[in-house]
Each structure stands twice: as C-alpha cells, then as structure tokens.
Amino acid sequence: MSDQVSPRRIFIAGGTGYLGTGLIPQLIRRGHEVSALVRPESAQKLPKGCRPVIGNALDRSTFGLAVKGADTFVQLVGVPKPSPWKGAQFRAIDLVSARASLETAKTAAVNHFVYVSVAHPAPIMKAYIEVRTECEAMIRTSHLRATFLRPWYILGPGHRWPLLLLPAYRLMSLLPSTREAAARLGLVTVEDMLATLAWAVEHPPEAIRIIDVPEIRRLGKNVR
C-alpha cells in the first residue's frame, strides 16, 4: 500500500458475493481493516483476516452496532445475475438493503459510502436501473460523501456470455450516433472493478463522485 494512503476501517455489506469475495483479500493485503456482514451459514466463506458480522442485510438492527468506528461503508448487496424478470426482487432486496445500509452509515457517522450502481440510461433492464437510480438518489440526500460506480456488465468467471456482443460493440463505437452509448454501456472485467473499488476506498471524494465505464477501465489498468 502506498505511503500516502492511511489504513482504513471498512465495513462491507455483500462480502461473500461476486465482487466481495475478490475485494476483501485485496483490501486486507493493502493493509486495511475489513469487517463484512454475512448470514450465519456464510461466515466460513469470508477470507482469512476479515471480521465476520452475523446479521441480515435487510434489517439494520442486526448489524448497526458493528458499523460504529468504520470510516468506509461498501454496499455490494444485490440480486445475483440481474435479469429483466427480477424486478420484484430488486425492490425487495437491492432497494431495502441499500436503505438499511445507508441509514446505518449515517447513524455511525461513516465518512465515505461506496455504492455499486449501474450504467444508465439503457434500453433494457429498466427495473434494475430504476432501483439503482432510486438508491443513488437516497444516498445523495443523505449528504454523505459517496462514490457511485456505474458498470454495465462485469465480465468474470461464470459471467462471460456478453463476449459474444463484442463485434456489435466495435461497430457501435465507430458510428457517431452510437459511440457514446458504446462507451457508457461497455463491458468491464471483474479485475478492473476490484482495482477501481480498492482505489475508491483509498481516495474518498469531497462530495459525490461518479465512476463510469471508461473510468473503471482506466483505473483498472493503472492502479493494480
């Protein structure tokens, strides 16, 4: 870890998910103290060195006390493998968990709230985008310092089918009418996301910061 970066006390909701399982070891290696919210049956999935907090991501009363003393809250809870027909689940899980995490972070006077959102606008996944946009709005009104990461699709193990769309992306990037959409809705790798998340944790903003797909790619290449 760079001498310019002070060790941070980080609380993660969603630590055993797609991003959390990769992010926690990176943060620990970089010298940070990490606690993660988990269900009882998932505690053994956390990497060595991470402090488990047993609780329910939808109920702030089960983990609120454990957040006290943290300077950074990373919100990663969400429905696995989002798809257009999971609208009810997005509202029941993604929205409710984000509200519980945000209220807990405010009460605990957390300095920086990191939220993985989604690129928008987009022609599909409207229910998912609607919920993530609603969560962003809640965070804005909290007046917490916050970072919004806005990937579209994160390529990684078990998440590679969009590679079939690369020829279409190349064509869209060549046309003036679709060039901006191709960049904003482009694909990023899980390695790029993890590097960007670690960078965001170590460099809190003054207010609200948005990191979109081109910036995720840039940071992913430059800060590993």
Image (cartoon, rainbow, N blue to C red):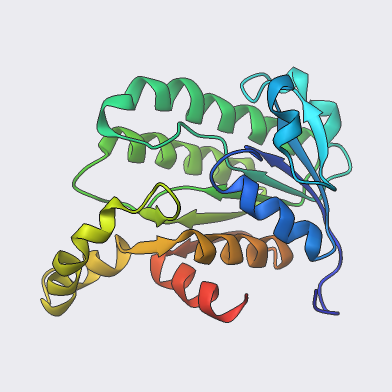
Please tell me which residue lies in front, 23 or 180: 23
Relative side of 190 to 142, left or right: left
User: Is 61 drawn above or below residue 199 in the view shown?
Assistant: above
Q: Nearer the viewer, residue 45 or 69?
A: 45
- Residue in the picture at 51% in, 66% down: 192
Q: Is residue 206 in sight in this rendering?
A: no
Question: Where in the figure is residue 67, as x and y percent of width and height?
Answer: 81, 36
Q: Nearer the viewer, residue 155 or 106?
A: 155
- Quarter occupied by the C terminus: bottom right
- Report if residue 85 is visible in the image: yes
The correct choice, above or below, for 177 with respect to 185 in the image is below
Relative to 154, 171 lies left or right: left
From this view, report whether residue 134 is shown above or below residue 146: above
Is residue 194 found left or right of 37 in the rendered image? left
Task: Tell me what residue is drawn at x 10 percent, y 76 percent.
Answer: 175
| Left or right of residue 181, residue 129 in this image | right
Q: Looking at the image, how many numbered discs can be counted on the residues? A: 0
Q: Which quarter of the figure is the N terminus placed in?
A: bottom right
Percent position (x, y) of residue 174? 14, 79
Q: Quadrant of residue 38?
A: top right
Vertical side of 187 occupied by 136: above or below? above
* Image location of residue 165, percent across then percent down: 20, 60
Residue at horizontal 74%, vertical 20%? 40
Residue under the image location 40 percent in, 49 percent down: 118
- Extreme right residue here? 69
Residue 199: x percent and y percent?
A: 65, 67
